[in-house]
Image: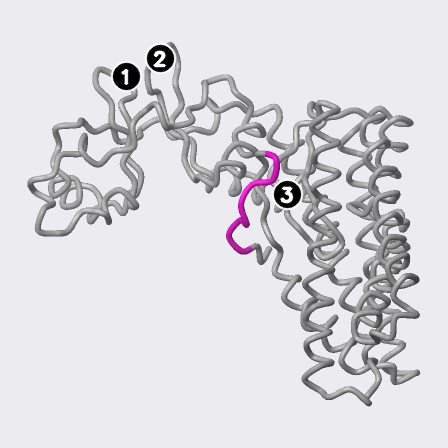
Amino acid sequence: MGIVPHLGRLLGIRIRLHFTWAVAFVLITAIVVTQFPEAYPLWQRIVVGVAASLVFFIAVGIREFTLTFLALTRGISAKPVTLFVFGGVSYRTKEATLPVLELLMAVAGLLSNLIIAGIFYGVHSVLVNTGNVLIDGLVLWLAFIYFMLALFHFSPGFPLDGGRLLLALLWKATGDYYRATRIASWTGQGIGLLFIAGGVLLLILAHQWFNGLALVFVGWVLHTAAARSRRQAVLHEALQPITARDIMARECPLVTQQLSLGQLVRDCVLVTGQRYFVVAEGGKLQGIVTMRNMKRVPRRRWDSTRLGEIMTPASEIKAAHAEQSAASLLEQMDELEINHMPVLEKGEVIGVVARDSLIRLDRTRAELGL
């Protein structure tokens, strides 16, 4: 999905930046540069365009901070947030929210957009008579861009605020969260395609290059985000009845702390390609050894280094229990950004769940039309 490494944490929630921001920065800068009065030197217009892009990014971040804080105060469990150009997208499970809470978050999102756009326009009203055309022009462009974003969010396509409003109403009417999410996401994909078609028509018929490209870009981002949200809902629904016991690898290689790294590499890594090992004593989890742990040790020290010296201890590992649903396992792996989890039963290791197995199951079900 083109997501770069996370930006950090906001109120304890991991924030990831979607690659569409790179396109948005270029597009916003280009629009401001070409539409700003040509009486100003090109370098000044470029500076104003870059500043507009940065301030717009900050404004979207403030909106997301506000909504995240509101979600936490209402007891909504927020997962890692992917920050798209129009705002953050965090897939929430049925267990993490309620129709009324989704309705509240949708309304809060719509109001926050209008408030931020109003603040920009208010600053413009104060600056308009000061004679500082550059700063006033920057703020006016931000007011315009954010007001258009606010209008965009009224579209009933998930994951926009209007789409969340539609999801909440559908969920309340049908009582089926996953069905409501699929319908709202399909609506979002459809609206995204309409925006793309509209942008293409502007390009071909009216030769409005920047407006057309902007509309195509907006439609593409919405279609991408909606498809991603729908796939998450479908995957979560499919994995819900499956447990860790059902999907785990039972013949996971258990190693001891006394085994040398050199022997592990020669006997296992280079033979089977295995990259994840569970360190256990008498079936009790002691830690894990991954490729990251191995690469920290110089090759000349492999034979003299015991796994107990380089392993990640059990106290720092998130383990699954045998009856835990595969859906919650995938959520935890996404949140922690890990690809494997040991499975415990009565305190003993009985297997390992790999993220690849969960994704492969999803693909298999999709191919069978399930």
- 2 or 3: mark nearer the eye: 3
Q: Which residue is mark 3?
A: 81
In the picture, the quarter occupied by the C terminus is top right
The residue tagged with tag 2: helix, strand or loop? loop
Q: Quadrant of residue 220?
A: bottom right
Q: Earlier in the sequence, mark 1 or mark 3?
A: 3
In the rendered view, how is the structure colored?
one colour
Q: How far is disc 1 from disc 3 in space, using C-alphas?
A: 35 Å
Q: Which residue is mark 1?
A: 284
Q: Residue at x 64, y 32 (%)?
A: 238
Q: Residue at x 86, y 69 (%)?
A: 197
x then y, percent, for residue 364: 56, 42
Q: Amino acid at mark 3?
A: Val
Q: Are marks 1 and 3 in contact (CB under 8 Å)?
A: no
Q: Amino acid at mark 2?
A: Gly
Q: Is residue 295 depicted above or below 196 in this figure?
A: above
User: Is 10 one of the magenta-colored residues?
Assistant: yes
Residue lying at the far front in this picture: please name it: 130
Q: How far is disc 2 from disc 3 in space, using C-alphas?
A: 33 Å
The residue tagged with tag 3: helix, strand or loop? strand
- 1 or 3: mark nearer the eye: 3
Q: Are marks 2 and 1 in contact (CB under 8 Å)?
A: yes
User: Is 363 one of the magenta-colored residues?
Assistant: no
Left or right of 117? Residue 364 is left
Q: Quadrant of residue 294?
A: top left
Chain part drawn in magenta: 4-11
Q: Which residue is mark 2?
A: 347
Left or right of 42? Residue 363 is left
Q: Amino acid at mark 1?
A: Lys
